[in-house]
Amino acid sequence: MPPHSFGHDRLVDTYLETERLALRPFTADDAGLLIELDSDPAVMRFLSGGRPTAPETVREQHLPRIRAGYEKWAGRFGVFAAYEKEGGAFIGWFLLRPEPDGPLDEAELGYRLRQSAWGRGYGTEGSRGLLDKAFGELGLRRVWAETMALNHRSRSIMEKLGMTFARALPTPEDMLMVEGADQGGVRYEITAEQWRAG
């Protein structure tokens, strides 16, 4: 089995499948995948100004928080590792989850992909699969996504999904060093009615 692959023993844990992708919960052994993903300056450009996330932060904070989410939301929501179905390469993650104390019929959509997966339509494909699950299976009322105003690649994905610009967002204090921080962020949304309409 190639490194960073989607083992057949894990297929029972699949959260979502699309034409080319399989999404599954992260396990306690997956810190290396997240550390590698967050060590790429291009991946982190609009998140930390290109600074990598410290490995101990991933191991001691991020991964435990991700795994606690599966229990909190009984597997309905969370952050999910994404793999190519053909070949099994790890390509990054997608998330669908409510605010920590928010209503369960509204959720955030997000994604973080390795550079090798860019430009292949995976962001749109995985996100569309999550929207279909959110509205078709989970009964959500609204899904939103946020990014930096300058992140045109991410905004393009949101627009392809039928999401519409909802409002401008101030730049968080811990992201003032990020390129385009002076332009702030943006929030896009889509409702169940909009999704059903097409």
Image (spheres, rainbow, N blue to C red):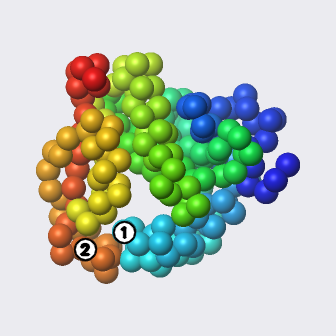
The residue under the point 73% across, 55% down is 4
| Left-right relation of 193 to 61 | left
User: Where 26 sits versus 56, above or below?
Assistant: above
Residue furthest to the front: 120
The residue under the point 44% across, 19% down is 137
Give the x, y percent position of residue 102: 31, 38
Q: Residues within 10 Å of mark 2 (few under 14, many from 20)?
A: some
Lower sequence index among marks 1 and 2? 1
| Left-right relation of 104 to 12 | left
Say whether marks 1 and 2 touch (CB < 8 Å): yes
User: Where 170 sits versus 94, above or below?
Assistant: below
**Disc 1 to disc 2, how far (Cα)?**
8 Å
**Quadrant location of residue 7?**
top right
User: Where 166 sits versus 119, above or below?
Assistant: above
Give the x, y percent position of residue 30: 69, 55
Q: Quadrant of the C terminus?
A: top left
User: Where 99 sits versus 40, above or below?
Assistant: above
Give the x, y percent position of residue 82: 60, 45
| Left-right relation of 120 to 154 | right
Front residue of this view, candidates 168 and 18: 18
- Pointer 2: what residue? 180
The residue under the point 39% across, 68% down is 47
Q: Residues within 10 Å of mark 1 (few under 14, many from 20)?
A: many
Residue furthest to the right: 1
Q: Is residue 182 visible?
A: yes
Q: Amino acid at mark 2?
A: Gly
Could you say whether the residue bearing mark 1 is in a helix, strand or loop?
helix
- Pointer 1: what residue? 46
